[in-house]
Image (tube, coloured by chain):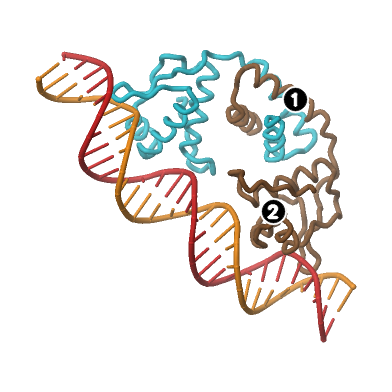
Chain colours: A brown, B cyan, C red, D orange
Amino acid sequence: MIFRIDTASDEPLFEQLVSRVRLGIARGELRAGERLPPARELGTALDMNVHTVLHAYQVLRDEGLIELRRGRGAVVTGPAKADLSAVERALETLVQAAREARLSPEATTTLLKEAMKR
Amino acid sequence: MIFRIDTASDEPLFEQLVSRVRLGIARGELRAGERLPPARELGTALDMNVHTVLHAYQVLRDEGLIELRRGRGAVVTGPAKADLSAVERALETLVQAAREARLSPEATTTLLKEAMKR
DNA sequence: TACTTGATCTATGGCAACTAGAACAAGTCC
DNA sequence: GGACTTGTTCTAGTTGCCATAGATCAAGTA
């Protein structure tokens, strides 16, 4: 399923969940109007606390990607699927170039963050 | 100077310092044989604790980028400057594509991390 | 009305980051 | 040799984030 969580990762659980949903929306796997599972249910399914799931949902709400309503749950409001093919191609090229320059993944990520600030 | 630290950032101080040095070496601003400032001195200059600076230095040593010796300090041993022009070009393309696809910086970063895992 | 589901509050345990001070050891320099 | 430099190691304390837990409340649905 789309909500794959890695307990061993050093990335916080709620942050992983946020990333999954964010990408799911960008890729069109989650469409506007679609409902996410109730926090309690998803918490049980992913073996994490309700509060942790709710925290992730609230972050997503703050980003404008979903809407939360009591009794109704979490509904995707984000933008429709974007065309990611250009992004995928650019990613491939970048990863290739970084490897040839022997840049570590960390250094590459730092460079990307810097480039996106401008 | 090269060691620019952002106290407001959510990225740990030592991690920021590590990134700066890592990039400095990759870009050729820091060359093999060059000395980094003593931890105590850099700590004062950047207004952070000596231990925090030392922690960063130790991470860099574990990555094989610098060498640490008592009495002598931290010396760059890392690889010579790599050619980053291809990486820079790929970065530009990626940032452009991500903007057009309206991908958030966070989502883009997540995609890059995934792409580099393979 | 009964049920669902997010919102809010309090509390707790664990861990990482950062700070602080002290003593120590290996190296440099005169 | 002696003074100085600089990383190493240790102990210790504070802070904040993450995650868990349980209870209660409020808004919406059926």
Expressed as whole percent of the image width and height from the top left, the position of residue A56 reads 68, 54
Question: In the displayed structure, does residue A31 sit left or right of residue D20?
Answer: right
Q: Real-space Cα distance between discs 2 and 1?
A: 31 Å
Q: Residue at x 42, y 30 (%)?
A: B57
| Crowding at mark 2 (Cα within 10 Å: few <14, some 14-19, many 20+) | few
Quarter of the C terminus of chain A within the rendering: top right
Question: In the displayed structure, does residue D19 sit left or right of residue B90?
Answer: left
Q: Nearer the viewer, mark 2 or mark 1?
A: 1
Q: Subunit of mark 2?
A: A
B2 vs A61: above or below: above
Q: To which residue does mark 1 refer?
A: A92
Q: Residue at x 66, y 46 (%)?
A: A6
The picture quadrant where one finds residue B107 is top right
| Crowding at mark 1 (Cα within 10 Å: few <14, some 14-19, many 20+) | some
- Which one is nearer the viewer's eye here, B95 or B115? B115
Which is nearer the N-term, disc 2 or disc 1? 2
B10 vs D28: above or below: above
Q: Secondary structure at mark 2?
A: helix
Question: In the displayed structure, does residue A13 sit left or right of residue A90?
Answer: left
- Give, as a three-letter code, the residue at label 1: Glu
- Give, as a three-letter code, the residue at label 2: Asp
Q: Are marks 2 and 1 in contact (CB under 8 Å)?
A: no
- Which one is nearer the viewer's eye here, A67 or B76? B76
Q: To which residue does mark 2 refer?
A: A62
Expressed as whole percent of the image width and height from the top left, the position of residue A67 reads 77, 58
Expressed as whole percent of the image width and height from the top left, the position of residue C21 reads 25, 45
